[in-house]
Image (tube, rainbow, N blue to C red):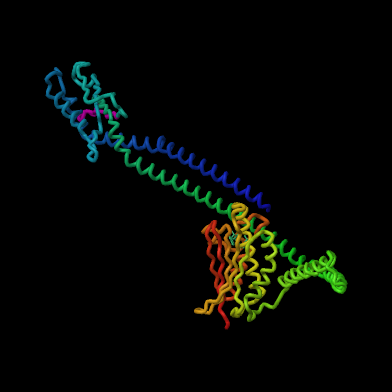
Amino acid sequence: MNEVMRGKKTTYFRSWITIIMSLLAMVLTGLMTAYWTWVLEPQLMAKAEVTARALAQSHVHALADELESVEGDVKNNDKIKAMEKTMNQILLLTDPNTGSPFILGMEIEVDYGVVRVPQGELDLKKGSIGADDFFVTEIPLYSKATRELLGIARLHNSREFFYHFKKDVRLTFFVGAGIGLIILVLAWRVVIILFEKIENAQKKLQEKQVQIVHAGRLAAMGEMASGIAHEINQPLAIIRIAADGLNSYFSAKDSQTIEARAAKKIISHVDRAADIIENMRSFVRPRPDTPELISLAEPIMAALSFFKEQFRIHRIILTLSIPADEIKVRVNPQKFEQIVVNILSNARFAVEKKGEVEGTGYQKEIIVCLSHDAKDNLVIFEVKDNGIGMKPEVLERCMEPFFTTKDVGEGMGLGLSIVHSIVKESGMDMEVESIEGEGTTFRIKIKGRG
Ligand code: ADP
């Protein structure tokens, strides 16, 4: 599948997950609120009512007895006083945990057909009625002897009591629901993070694929270049023969004319071109993968032959420090040449880049140095540039295959990973030091062999 399409699909999925999770969260919140409002709260209310009723019930018989035995004048009647006392006791019933009253007020409605008092004279009301009613519980008052209905006691329950009654349940319910919601949000975040990771991985994969294709193209070009170099050799040889002929002719005449000097110039430039071509061919020519006892000056100079001209054109000062009596080491010369080419190529890029920013006041410099540490018998090869340098995070990753900070076409991120693998397989040691904006030093240490 096309990478762009895949990326779009991931973004599309991510949006859908966000929408689905948000809907889920909204539905869950709605369901919880509805469950609380229409199921749990009515259940709790019924339970609170039953509790209040049950507690009041134990006093109701006494109330009925007093009501049944009341007679005649209601004023200063002992039975009425007893009845008021019982009512007060009901009103004093409280929740032992919270101290909040179960019932705020109560009133008794009497059946005057049964109770023997003049109609309208017995009006028993106690506590606060109607002010803060939450629900009203009605308890019938029956005669113990005749089982006749004497009246109804109406209990006005307290909101405070109900509030305490449901407090614990509400806390448990909403804490549980809140935890559910938090888990949902976390799950959503995890899914989003996973999608982001997949997206990033796909993007990286896409970049690597572009780099691999580019690497393949360069490899094909390298092969073509070696063929072309071979073909150029022939016309060069002919030019050389012709220039030699001309030179012999002018030498015989001891001529110092412009033409005589031009013939000499042709010979020297043809020789230079032939050298470059020969170096190029030897660089790509497959050789046995065996280490040889050599002086490192050889592969270093061979690698430098590719750069000397470029350094001159781009005004890069190359300082070479290679001692004549260099200690020999056991390495594969072609591989070491590859190491030097890759490191020099990066050094050139780094000073060029810095030059683009700094302008004419900046002097591009590359130092190539070979030395011997007699104490540990180590041959040390060092390339130091005063280019752009690396940020710590780049320095940390610069050896990774396909890691590059360069634009497409400028680098594939393979140079240093190749250097690293050659250094490892050949038992050498490598150090890289770099300071952003100041420059970079690559140092390779190889065991000396006398
Ligand atoms: P490439 O040169 O194709 O990017 P390399 O593996 O050779 O791949 O280098 C990886 C990265 O290391 C480069 O993109 C660059 O950021 C950093 N780097 C390597 N050498 C230097 C240097 N001399 N100066 C600054 N940065 C460097």
Instruction: Name the image quarter holding residue 100.
Output: top left
Task: Report if residue 98 lies within the magenta region.
Answer: no
- Closer to us: 249 or 40: 249
In this picture, residue 13 sits left or right of residue 310: left
Front one among 138 and 270: 270
Q: Position of residue 359 (x, y in %)?
A: 61, 52
Q: Is residue 229 left or right of residue 93?
A: right
Quadrant of the frame with the C terminus: bottom right
Quarter of the figure with residue 223: bottom right
- Residue 181 pos. (x, y %): 44, 44
Placement of 53 over or under 400, stated as above or below: above
Q: Looking at the image, is 221 positioned above or below residue 370?
A: above
- Above or below residue 324? Residue 442 is above
Q: Residue at x 79, y 68 (%)?
A: 270
Q: Residue at x 23, y 19 (%)?
A: 112
* Residue 234 visible at all: no
The image quarter containing residue 122 is: top left
Magenta includes 144? yes
Indicate the position of residue 153 as horizontal and vertical percent values.
Answer: 25, 27
**Closer-to-camera residue (403/311):** 311
> In this rendering, does residue 419 appear at all?
yes
Decide which of 340, 35 is in the foreground and name it.
340
Location of ligand 1 given as a quarter of the image: bottom right
Q: Which residues are magenta?
A: 137-148
Provide residue 298's location: percent of width, then percent of height.
Answer: 66, 75
